[in-house]
Amino acid sequence: MYSFGTLLLDLLSGKHIPPSHALDMIRDRNLQILTDSCLEGQFSNDDGTKLVRLASRCLQYQPREHRNPRSLVSALIPVQKETEVIYVFS
């Protein structure tokens, strides 16, 4: 779970955040500062906040504070968006 939290935070921020600094970065920043500008408008502030909270829960040092895989998937389902995939055949 810890690794998933670091990956999720890296994806949201667009940069690698050392795991030792990840929780401090979440606590000290708001969503707009934390989120990569390339993702602007791709999801709502509510969804972004949910993802940051999910990353924070995954990054907790105490195993009892971690999310289990089933609850992780359950938390991600409402945030999932349908995307259009265009296939190009040559």
Image (cartoon, helix red, strand yellow):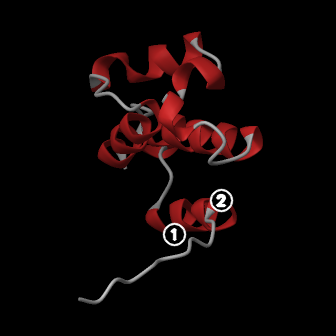
For residue 1, side relative to residue 73 (left or right):
left
Above/below status of 26 relative to 64: above
Neighbour class for label 1 at 10 Å: few (<14), some, many (≥20)?
Answer: few
Quarter assignment of residue 35: top right
48 above or below 72? above
Percent position (x, y) of residue 1? Answer: 37, 50
Indicate the position of residue 18 as horizontal and vertical percent values.
Answer: 27, 22
Number of numbered labels in the structure image: 2
Disc 2 marks a residue whose amino acid type is Val
The residue under label 2 is 79
Kind of element beneath mark 2: helix
**Relative to the observer, which residue lies in front, 19 or 47?**
47
Q: Give the Cα distance between marks 2 and 1.
A: 15 Å
Which sits earlier in the primary sequence, circle 2 or circle 1? Answer: 1
Report the mark closest to the observer, 2 or 1: 2
Tell me the quarter of the picture where residue 45 sits: top right
Outermost residue toward the top?
28
User: In screen coordinates, is 11 left or right of 28?
Assistant: left
Query: What residue is at 38 percent from the left and 32 percent from the top?
Result: 14
Residue drawn at (64%, 23%) of the image: 32
Going by the numbered disc 1, the residue's amino acid type is Arg
Q: Identify residue for label 1.
A: 70
Q: Identify which residue is drawn at 68% across, 37% down.
A: 49
Q: Judging from the image, what secondary structure is the residue with disc 1 in?
A: helix
x then y, percent, for residue 41? 66, 42
